Every structure is written in C-alpha cells, then in structure tokens.
Image (spheres, rainbow, N blue to C red):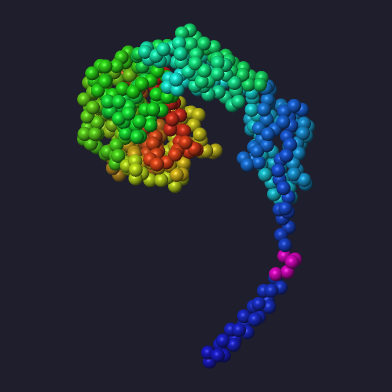
Amino acid sequence: MKSMINKISLLLLGFTILFVLPGCSDDNKSDLQLDGDTWLTVLELDDNYQGIIDRTTKTVTVAVPEIYQTDAMKVTAIEASEGAVTSIQPGDMVNFSFPQVIKVSNGDVFLDFTVQIKHDEAKIISFKLNDTYAGVIDQTNHTITVRVPGTVDVRNLVPVITTSEDALVTPASGQAVDFTDPVDFKVTYNTASAVYKVTVIPTDAPSAVYVGLAVSMDQLNAEEKEAAIWMLNNIANSQYISFEDVQAGRIDLSECKLMWWHLHIDGGIDTMDKFDKAAPQAVNALVRMKELYNDGMNLLLTRYATYYAAKLGATKDGNNPNNCWGQSEESGEIAGGPWNFFIAGHESHPIYQNLIMNSGENDKVYTCDAGYRITNSTAQWHIGSDWGGYDNNDVWREKTGGVDLGYGGDGAIVVWEYLPEETKGGIVCIGSGCYDWYAFGVDASGDKYHGNVGRMTENAINYLMSK
C-alpha cells in the first residue's frame, strides 16, 4: 500500500512540473523602464551663476552676490543624463528665495535634486581671546565685546576667530593684537564685506558663573567638568566658582546675571534627603543663594540641580521632581539610535531656536545619535492620576507654579521654568535624561545631534540673562 502511495505522489509531482514550467517563458517581462540614469549634470541661472551639483546629497548649490534678488531667476541652462527629462526647463522663471526641487526622470525612475541659493557672506561667527575669553557678537551693529579678568594684559591678546565659509579676516586669527583701544576686524568674501569693532573690557566681576560643589573646576567629575569648560569657552565674561566661594563672599557678583549649576551623581538620586547628603556645600550656601535669587539672580539648573529650585523657594508646593534615576558613567548604555524629547506647543520658545532638527519633526529636540554612551540621568515630573500627586499638567502648574516646556515619551515634564516674580530672578530647569555632556570612552565630536546640548544651553543662558 505504501509503495502505491509513493507512485501516485511521484505522478502528481510530474504533472505539477509540466504545468509550472511553461510559466517561465521570456514573454513574462515587466513593462517598467528602469535602465536609464537620472543625474542632473548642469544648472545655470541668470546666465552667470553655475550650480554645484552634489550627487551624494542630491543637492545643487548656486552662489550669488551678497545682495541679489532671487525671487525670479531665469533658468538659462539645464542638462541631465541621456534620455532623461527635467521638471524645470530652460527659460523658466523660478522663485529661488526658498529651496526648489528639480525632478529628473528617465522612463519609470527619477531622482529629486534640491536647489538652494547661497549668498556671499562675510561674518564673524565666533571670537575668543587667548582661546579662553569668548566675545559677545552683535551681528546687527557689527560689534564684539569681550570681558577679561583685570589681571590680563590687553596689549598682547591673540584672537581665535571663526568666520563664515571661506571668508578672510584682518587682523588674522592667531595674530597678537593690542586691545588697549577698540580694534576693527575686516571680513571679506567675494562681493561681501563687513567690519566688526572689537572692544575688550577688563573686569573682575563676572557676568555669568558656573557654580559647583568642588573647590576648583579641575576637581569636578567628568560630566560637570565638560559642561563647565564649555561655558568658559562659549559664554562671555564667565568663570567657575564654588558654593563655598558664594557662601564666603569671595567673588564679586555685583554684575553677575546668571548662575548655572549642572549636578551629576553616578547612579542618580530620587529624594531630597539624598540630595542634601550629596550636595552639602549647596545646602550650606542657601542663605546667600536665596538672597541672590530674591534680588534678581537668574539660574539655570540642570540634571539633579533641579532639586535646588525647591530649596530656593521657587516652587509653590516645595516639592522636587518626583521621578528620578540614573546610571554610572563607565557603565552607561550605548544609544541604539537618536535620543530626543518632545517640545510640542513650545517650538517657538527661545531655548529651542537654531537647533538641528529632523525634517518634519519640529516637535522633537535630538541630543545624541546612535553610538553615544549616556547615563540617562533623569529628574522629571510624573504626570497622571495613578501616582505622584499631579493628575494632569494644569494641576502640576497650579501646585508648583512652574511652566512646562518639554516632555518625555510618556508625557512626563522634563524641561520647565519658574518665571521672574517681583524682584526674584527666573529659573530654567532641564531634567531630561537626553541632556548629557560627557560620553565615557566615546568620541562625540562627530555626533550629528550632540551640538544641540550646547546650543540649547547657550539659548537658555541668553534667555535668562535678557530678563
């Protein structure tokens, strides 16, 4: 019986093969035309301006003079791969005051090339003296102000200057200059030119300070030190001071408008008792710190320093963030993809301007890319009727007096502020686990998004100092 079944199975298999094989003829071909190239090879505008075509990014950059109307430019030449057609034709008048897309089609395949106009530009983007003292640049009036300690010899200072692409500056970056009197720096590039007047002001009273638990900046942990170094290199007339300096009155804070404290603790903290044990220097300096805050001092409090807002009396209910955790630097997790938090409804807030955003995702702030080692140190406010004491955002605002500005994926509040009131200063708090300065064992210099941490911090400092 088994032999008979096997024979029947073989017979059926043979019929199946005979039935299927005819379907493999050369007649069963797709009508799609997929063989042609779709490259844009030439683009010329207004007879004079040639496009630089980048096949990798599918972009075309057209350089024009500093002052040039681009809202009605004539396409005087456009070429593409053999057999391909373009969506824009020679003779077309196009508004290039914003990026335009040219579609190159060949049969059933196509590529989109984005055309962007680049005006000649001559700007000083950053200005530092002795690679330490950062200048405040006014791009409207073309002035730069640099504050240096009174002990610095202003007759022999070396500027380190970053300009817009390919621009030349005189006096040159790296050339020692006497700044006893204001000095003019001329920047040129093709048709563009500008003169910046640089004024150096010796002063021993800082405009902004980074305050920490350590006696000196060198004694800070790696996370805090990275943040402090950034501030001294990027915020004009800033310096490091300790809470002991504040308590003892060793620093002249008469011109100081802002204090920044970034507190990192390996493993995190989740109660005020733990904060008190971890930061006794800050607790001991509270009397003087409250005086400064009540007299108008603005504060940027980041990571676990956000607890300090309650200590200063800025919160109505006296509470600290209710959902906190963190890892250790050396065992922090490696990000498997970009990290971000949400800012829906607050995209126009000053602290979120000029960040690197993903197209179509203006409601998200990205702070690091895949491969970054992050401790995910978080000090946030859980919102919900399940636990925590804040049923919704309105209840949180009413009880704490805070203004929510950023959110975690579960709706937790991770960025917030306390607005100035009467004589009191303003406070911005950033407690998102995405906000991270130091990646143990990882070179973050090429990270696509990590620069947003510095930009957001600078925005917050400028926002607070403008109050």
Q: Position of residue 330 (x, y in %)?
A: 34, 43
Identify the residue shown where x is 76% and y is 39%: 79
Whether residue 25 is in magenta: the answer is: yes
- Left or right: 55 with respect to 197? right
Q: Quadrant of residue 16?
A: bottom right
Q: Looking at this rendering, what residue extends furthest in the top direction?
A: 181
Q: What residue appears at the point 23 percent right and 36 percent down from the top-left corner?
A: 274
**Magenta residue span:** 24-28
Determine the main secondary structure of the stretch shown in magenta: loop
Q: Is residue 393 above or below residue 426?
A: below
Determine whether, in the image, residue 31 is placed left or right of residue 304.
right
Q: Is residue 416 visible?
A: no
Residues 135 and 315: in front is 135
Tell me residue 206's x, y (percent): 36, 16
Is 351 in front, or is 388? 351
The residue that appears at 73% across and 50% down in the rendered structure is: 36
Answer with the quarter of the image where residue 234 lies. Answer: top left
Which picture quadrant has residue 119? top right
Say if residue 110 shows up in the picture. yes
The single residue placed furthest to the bottom in the displayed view is: 1
Which corner quadrant holds the C terminus?
top left
Q: Is residue 352 magenta?
A: no
The image shows residue 28 at horizontal and vertical percentages of 72, 65
Relative horizontal placement of residue 377, taking residue 19 as reference (left or right): left
Q: Residue at x 70, y 69 (%)?
A: 24
Q: Is residue 215 left or right of residue 68?
A: left
Residue toward you, 389 or 320 = 320
